[in-house]
Image: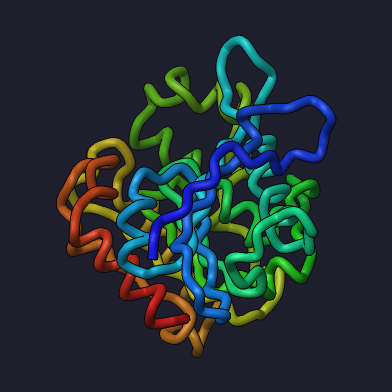
């Protein structure tokens, strides 16, 4: 087998090409007729290890980023990821059929966790454009949040300088960010999605309280079946915010979760 890399595939349905709304697809060229699940890694640099360890195809997308020179703010970033999910789950004659679009695993890191949580949990009262069709929720088998940001208000209490550093750019200058707290969102539907919350004890950029809050919230949402639906690992990793992604321990945790639910 050889690794196939397809770069810069446009998922934004517009006549003007936008490099920030494209994705790369990596998969093993195989004669096996069985279609494997897909891993969608939102801003992750460890895709090569995931392809090798799981043999599953991996998509790494671009999406619009906020800066002082543009008008891109939440929920625009998450809207792009939702558009990508719709693109890859719809039948497209010119798109290579190398994965099973009904079995998708989502991995997100840092701010990407807030984006995915806003799509998968019910944020419709504040961000109706992030409402996914039921077919996408049915396709998602598992979700991994790594070093995630979930509660902006809580984050600013612990790191007040983050407001001017990136919160205002990403979420606008608001008197309160309480409505964007993903640890207050309900489930959109009681489906079979499995959740894994990862956080490193050595992360000095986003503290473990963020992941603890989401872990508690998901456990409360799932109630008696929480053990089947929700897992947490906030003890094993010791590295810094971004460097944990390239560690063998991180890869093992992720792969064990995916293979355990595939």
The residue lying furthest to the right in this view is 15
Instruction: Provide residue 65's location: percent of width, then percent of height.
Output: 57, 27
| Location of residue 179 with respect to 160 vertically, above or below | below
Q: Quadrant of residue 85?
A: bottom right
Specify whether 117 is left or right of 46.
right
Tell me which corner region of the image, top left, top right, bottom left or bottom right, holds residue 231.
Answer: bottom left
| Residue extending farthest bottom | 224
**In-image side of 108 versus 133 (left or right):** left
Nearer-the-camera pick, 248 or 172: 248
In the rendered image, is residue 212 in sight? no
| Residue 228 % position (x, y) | 45, 86
Q: Residue at x 51, y 71 (%)?
A: 142
Residue at image position (77%, 70%) is: 134
User: Is the image coloured rainbow, by chain, by secondary structure, or in one colour?
Assistant: rainbow
In the rendered image of this protein, does residue 189 appear above or below residue 75? Answer: below
Residue 42 image position (x, y, % from top left): 50, 47
Q: Nearer the viewer, residue 210 or 131?
A: 131
Residue drawn at 66 percent across, 80 percent down: 190
Q: Is residue 119 left or right of residue 181?
A: right
Which residue is located at x 45 percent, y 67 percent?
A: 56
Q: In the image, residue 68 lies at what x, y percent?
A: 57, 12
If the image is split into quadrants, where does the N terminus sit?
A: bottom left
The residue lying toward the viewer, choosing from 80 and 115, is: 80
Furthest residue toward top: 69
**Is residue 17 visible in this depiction of the protein?**
yes
The mark total stands at: 0
């Amino acid at each position: 087998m050889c690794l196939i890399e397809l770069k810069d595939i446009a998922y934004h349905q517009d006549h003007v090409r936008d490099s920030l709304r494209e994705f790369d697809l990596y998969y093993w060229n195989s004669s096996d007729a069985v279609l494997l699940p897909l891993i969608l890694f939102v801003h992750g640099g460890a895709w090569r290890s995931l392809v090798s360890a799981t043999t599953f195809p991996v998509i790494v997308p671009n999406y619009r980023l906020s800066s002082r020179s543009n008008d891109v703010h939440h929920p625009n970033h998450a809207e792009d990821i939702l558009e990508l999910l719709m693109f890859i789950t719809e039948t497209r004659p010119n798109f290579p059929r190398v994965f099973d679009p009904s079995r998708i695993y989502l991995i997100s890191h840092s701010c990407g966790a807030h984006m995915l949580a806003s799509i998968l949990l019910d944020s419709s009262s504040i961000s109706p454009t992030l409402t996914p069709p039921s077919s996408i929720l049915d396709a998602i088998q598992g979700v991994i949040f790594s070093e995630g940001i979930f509660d902006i208000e809580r984050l600013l209490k612990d790191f007040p300088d983050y407001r001017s550093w990136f919160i205002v750019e990403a979420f606008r200058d608001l008197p309160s960010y309480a409505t964007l707290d993903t640890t207050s969102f309900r489930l959109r539907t009681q489906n079979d999605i499995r959740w894994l919350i990862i956080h490193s004890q050595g992360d000095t950029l986003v503290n473990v309280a963020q992941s603890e809050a989401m872990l508690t919230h998901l456990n409360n949402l799932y109630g008696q079946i929480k053990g089947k639906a929700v897992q947490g690992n906030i003890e094993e990793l010791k590295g810094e915010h971004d460097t944990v992604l390239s560690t063998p321990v991180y890869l093992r945790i992720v792969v064990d979760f995916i293979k355990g639910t595939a």
